[in-house]
Amino acid sequence: MGGTELADAWHSSIGAGGALSASELDVLFEVLADRERRRILRYFAESDDEAATFAELIEFLADEAAEGADPDRLAVTLHHTHLPKLADVGFIEYDDRSETVRYRGEPAVEEIVALARTYGSESDSSSARD
């Protein structure tokens, strides 16, 4: 299933209290399985802003990362991996020309991210990377 199809399914089903198919759930949980992507979503969930610059997200992730994290590496993985995956499922819109990220808030996703933070160790430096 393509990213646009999943985004449409997500917004029409979950946003309206419906359900996703098993394959849609697999993609959703794959996206949310990564700590950095959950941190990006948490950034927006805890902020009053619906948009952020690429630099603001790098600064936030670097502050939250393990000591000695390489901001350049964070920038590369953010640009090439995390933002595209979040955009594919419709959680964000990313304009790489203006380096602007717009959040498409989903209360159900925010609950999942909060739950993961409550029961997990979001400050743990070990993370599954794509």
Image (cartoon, helix red, strand yellow):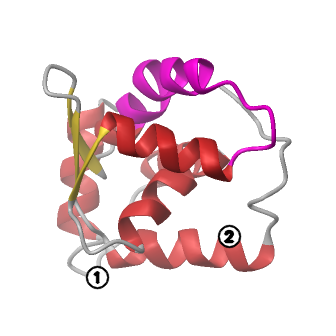
Sequence-earlier tag: 1 or 2: 1
Q: Main secondary structure of the magenta part?
A: helix
Write the residue at 14% across / 19% down.
Answer: 97
Which disc is residue 75 wearing?
none
In the image: residue 60, left or right of residue 4: right
In the image: residue 113, left or right of residue 109: right
Picture coordinates of residue 117 (x, y %)? 68, 71
In the image: residue 111, left or right of residue 94: right
Quarter where residue 70 is shown: top right
Q: Nearer the viewer, residue 97 or 80?
A: 97
Write the residue at 66% across / 49% down.
Answer: 35
Write the residue at 58% across / 76% down.
Answer: 114
Badge 1 local density, few (<14 within 10 Å), some, or many (20+)?
few
In the image: residue 79, left or right of residue 13: right
Is 18 inside the magenta-drawn segment? no
Picture coordinates of residue 55 (x, y %)? 37, 36
Q: Nearer the viewer, residue 77 or 57?
A: 57
Q: Give the foreground label among 1 and 2.
A: 2
Quarter where residue 122 is shown: bottom right
Q: CA distance from mark 1 to mark 2?
A: 21 Å
The residue indicated by pointer 2 is 116
Picture coordinates of residue 26 (x, y %)? 55, 47
Element class at badge 2: helix
Badge 2 local density, few (<14 within 10 Å), some, or many (20+)?
some
Q: Amino acid at mark 2?
A: Ala
Is residue 42 visible in the rendered image? The answer is yes
| Up/down of 41 relative to 35, above or below | below
Is residue 26 visible in the rendered image? The answer is no
Q: Amino acid at mark 1?
A: Gly
Q: Which residues are magenta?
A: 65-85
Is 69 inside the magenta-drawn segment? yes
The residue indicated by pointer 1 is 17
